[in-house]
Image: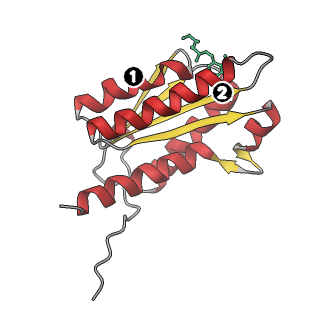
Amino acid sequence: MTKVIEGKFDAKGKSFAIVVSRWNEFIVGKLLEGAKDSLLRHNCDIKNITVIYCPGSFELPLLVQKAALTKKYDAVIALGAVIRGATPHFEFVAGESIKGIAQVALSSGVPCINGILTCDTIEQAIERAGTKAGNKGFEAATVAIEMVDVLSQIK
Ligand code: INI
């Protein structure tokens, strides 16, 4: 018979760090609300959620790494919103942030989840922060819960 391993969505007894970029706070604040909502609705104790603020999305990987290496958290969730402006700055910030978070996940073995919006317009960001395209913070936290559980099953 085929053996199947898949994550369950139960955050009871699990600890999470949410690292939050301060840029575009009116968007990222909604992602944070969504992330906390998912964790709490999946049985996470509020005392097991730590929120860490950082200046901008470019700084997220270092704080995600710091949090991951403490081994105090079962997963680290990075939240940010990078919105295209008039210069190529967007490409560098978005690319480095997301690449950095992926690197930390692989090097630490701790699931580090990408909840960074990369949008051409503010409207696109609003759509993904709790309006018509859902809430990507909620989705990122739900992915974190699934990853924690599936990783615990692979021995
Ligand atoms: N940081 C963001 O999180 N979102 C943005 O849209 C953004 N833009 O557009 O510039 C942004 N820039 C700041 C960057 O993350 C760093 O904090 C800064 O470059 C200092 O290292």
Horizontal and vertical percent for residue 112?
40, 39
Tag 1: amino acid: Leu
The quadrant of the rendered image in which ligand 1 is seen is top right
Q: Does label 2 point to a residue whose CB lies under 8 Å from ligand 1?
A: yes
Q: Is residue 4 above or below residue 111?
A: below
The answer to which image quadrant residue 149 occupies is: bottom left
Residue 154 visible in the current orientation: yes
The answer to which image quadrant residue 12 occupies is: bottom left
Instruction: Report the quarter where the N terminus lies.
Output: bottom left
- What is the tally of numbered marks visible in this picture? 2
Residue at the far bottom: name it.
Answer: 1
Residue name at image x 57 percent, y 42 percent:
137
Query: Which badge, 2 or 1, is on the more N-terminal residue?
Result: 1
Instruction: Please state if 99 lies on the left or on the right of 108 as rendered.
Output: right
Q: Which mark is residue 63?
A: 1
Residues 114 and 67: in front is 114
Horizontal and vertical percent for residue 101?
44, 33
Residues 43 and 136: in front is 136
Which residue is the site of mark 2?
82
What SS does tag 2 mark?
strand
Tag 2: amino acid: Val
What SS does tag 1 mark?
helix
Instruction: Report the quarter where the C terminus lies.
Output: bottom left
Q: Which mark is residue 141?
A: none
Q: How far apart are labels 2 and 1 at the CA level?
A: 17 Å
Tell me if mark 1 has few (under 14), some (14-19) or many (20+) residues whose alpha carbon lies within 10 angstroms of its own. Answer: some
Residue name at image x 79 percent, y 31 percent:
122
